[in-house]
Amino acid sequence: MDFLNYAFMQRALLAAVLVGITAPAVGIYLVQRRQALMGDGIGHVAMTGVGLGFLLSTSPVWMATAVSVLGAVLMELIRWYGRTRGDIALAMLFYGGMAGGVMFINLAPGGSNANLTSYLFGSLSTVSQSDVVSICLLAAFVVLVTLGLRRQLFAVSQDEEFARVTGLPVRALNLLTAVTAAVTVTVAMRVVGLLLVSALMVVPVAAAQQLTRSFTATFVIAVAIGIAVTVSGTITSYYQDVPPGATIVLLTIAAFVALTALATPLARRRARAAAQAGPAGDPAECSVPATREAGDEVGV
Amino acid sequence: MTSEPSEPVIALRGVTAELGARPVLRGIDLTVGRGEVVALLGANGSGKSTAIRTVIGQVPASGGTIELFGTPRRSFRAWSRVGYVPQRTTAAGGVPATVTEIVSSGRLSRTRFGVFRRADREAVQRALAAVGMADRAKDSVNALSGGQHQRVLIARALVAEPELLIMDEPMAGVDLASQEILARTLREQVAAGATVLLVLHELGPLEPLIDRAVVLRDGCVLHDGPPPQAVGQHALPGHDHVHPHESIHTGLLS
């Protein structure tokens, strides 16, 4: 446990835990809305923010937050108003964001793509004291939104049309989801990097739902997986001198594979139990011939 | 009370709407009085789904006026008075969710800031019992059949204890057993005084409940009056005669 003696490792581990909590907590709503790649898009846009931060000699974290929030809002607006050309507009936003980042950082005095690398792929040693303060504040916001508004965000992500009729401010909640995702990207930027952050939003959720039947359980397990992989990845990265972002993402994917292998027999047993309990538990279904039931399962 | 038979719960006057550049509604008048059960009929593409989606605000109306309980829809806020059953899509969310979780989301209009109290949890159980899904409360909705899925969506609409039910093809793709449960549930709601506006492809097992039928064609009202009788029903535009007793009418293939 000698790594705990180093201040930079304490900061990195704190940042890692916060990333492990926030990325899946936001990611679950993106996955539910089938916008799993939105985090990736925001990550690209955030590069412009990092570049601008260098150029204007301000904090890259806060500049990246500002630009990625703007980008996320823009993506949400495109989703409302420009459905037909939405994918093209999004593509322009992604690549424009990346190109902007490279351009600005090279315009900055003494800046080169090398400065960008630690933001693209994450780096432990560069998490500064002021970064930690920013990350804590941003993570607090993300946790507050994703837990405090979980019922509202669940309803909007599950069925937007229905959520409207329950009187929820659907547009405001969609914008809030986008902004929260953008904030999470910048929280995770220092540890896993902009290009890999989306993996931590999506893969723990995908891994968790191999085991779960409910949204709540998926949320809890995804966050647990998130914390486990970010902490163990950070420690591995310290001992083996490998990049933390890549280590964390590979560990997350390994967790997904392991849980899938574990869950397959579990799902089979559940299906068998359901088939046995089914006719006794639901007498109404008995009157329907078995051949029809099979047809009913399709497309649900 | 005025001389009118009942205060209109839904009132559409000259409503027009476009999807993209295509006009879908070309001046619809539709009034639903308190306690009435009105069926919106018509062929695919006649605008019946779009009509109810303008009522709930999912599709913007480009002209005309829409009122809910006497209030212009734009300033209408009492959404707990409205229960909505959207046309069932094949897409469950990208994350597993239990029957209880889905039904609970319908109760949000009755809660303050989404905080659930005991009365809310009890309402969820009552709604599940009403559609005969209480024993499936903890199951994932992905494990349900089409008919069971539809029953969950109806429970989600009922859980806020609404005065007005708006349903888009509630019988589409529903097996016979579920159709009977749905018809019974609707009968109970109507007996308790609920107002119902439903989009139907055919009158089917709900026929005895329906007070009035409005038939749309090409975005205009073609007929507004008593439900078409058996013979008239066959003559409806786009009517395909699939009898519910012979086979399951999915409504998806037509």
Image (cartoon, rainbow, N blue to C red):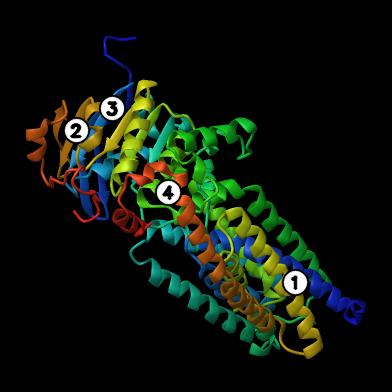
Q: Which residue is mark 2?
A: B214
Question: Is residue A62 or residue A140 the one in the foreground?
Answer: A140
Secondary structure of the residue carrying tag 3 is strand
Q: Is A29 situated above or below B134? A: below
Residue A151: numbered disc: none
Q: How far across and down, in percent of the image, does residue B183 sit?
A: 32, 34
Please say whether residue B19 is visible from this viewpoint: yes
Image quadrant for the C terminus of chain A? bottom left
Which residue is tagged 4? A279
Q: Nearer the viewer, mark 3 or mark 1?
A: 3
Residues tagged by mark 3 and mark 1 found on one chain of the structure = no
Using the numbered discs, state the Cα–Cα distance from disc 3 to disc 1 in whole angstroms: 57 Å
**Distance CA(mark 1)–CA(mark 2):** 60 Å
Rendered location of residue B145, percent (x, y):
38, 52
Q: Is residue A128 left or right of residue B133?
A: right
Mark 4 chain: A
- The amino acid pointed to by label 1 is Ala
